[in-house]
Amino acid sequence: MRRRLGTAVFALLWWLALFGWWVVLVGTNAGLELVAAVCAALLGALLAVGVRGRGLLRFRFEARWLAKAAKVPWKVVQEIVVVFWALALNLAGLRRVSSRYRAFDFPAGDHGPTSRGRRAVATQLDSFSPNTLPLDIDPDTGLALRHELDPRRTSNDLP
């Protein structure tokens, strides 16, 4: 009984969050949009319950990985400069932008909740940077793959 109540609360919270997000995104509370929000939020909440039932929403976050988020604003500013500089050089015809994909070692861990949390935090923090786009972190090989717009000015690790 307690588990069903927990699942119902989980689904209700997801439904409320998705419903609110829909209304914010469309920017109106017209009747048809509210009906669409109800339907979309219901589908999303059912999907979240299904994913939770399969055990795929178990994460545990390490404090040292969360602390790396403090560096992100500075990294974003640095990489905005890198992107604009690469664009300026390309427009001036001085240097062509040559992006590339790069794989590098990453302590991905295993398939446990702590390792999943580490991969989620690293991917999210790296996605804020305008010069890099994280694509995959493979726990089996311990490799991370990302796309770099200007590879000469990026670090070899995730945040």
Image (cartoon, rainbow, N blue to C red):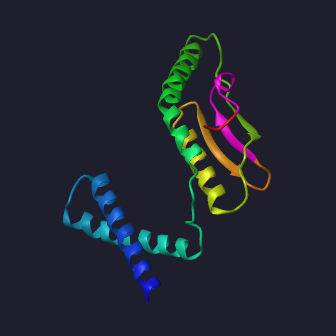
| Residue found at the far bottom of this picture | 1
Residue at screen point 47% across, 83% down: 3
Image: 111 above or below 1 = above
Compare residues 86 and 56 and report the one nearer the observer: 56
Residue at screen point 55% across, 47% down: 63
* Residue 40 visible in the current orientation: no
Where residue 151 appears, as percent x and y from the top left, is 68, 26
On screen, residue 33 versus residue 90, left or right, reads left
Residue 147 belongs to the span the image colors magenta: yes
Compare residues 59 and 62 and report the one nearer the observer: 62
Where residue 65 appears, as percent x and y from the top left, is 58, 44
Q: Tell me how many marks there are.
A: 0
Q: Classify the position of the C terminus by image quarter.
A: top right
Residue 131 belongs to the span the image colors magenta: no
Within the image, what quadrant is residue 114 found in? bottom right
Where residue 141 appears, as percent x and y from the top left, is 80, 51
* Residue 118 visible in the current orientation: yes
Residue at screen point 32% across, 59% down: 22
Image: 138 above or below 54 = above
Give, as a single range, the part of the protein colored magenta: 143-156
Within the image, what quadrant is residue 95 found in? top right
On screen, residue 140 versus residue 50, left or right, reads right
Where residue 16 appears, as percent x and y from the top left, is 32, 67
Residue at screen point 43% across, 89% down: 1
| Residue found at the far front of this picture | 63
| Residue found at the far right of this picture | 141
On screen, residue 101 versus residue 79, left or right, reads right
Image: 40 above or below 23 = below
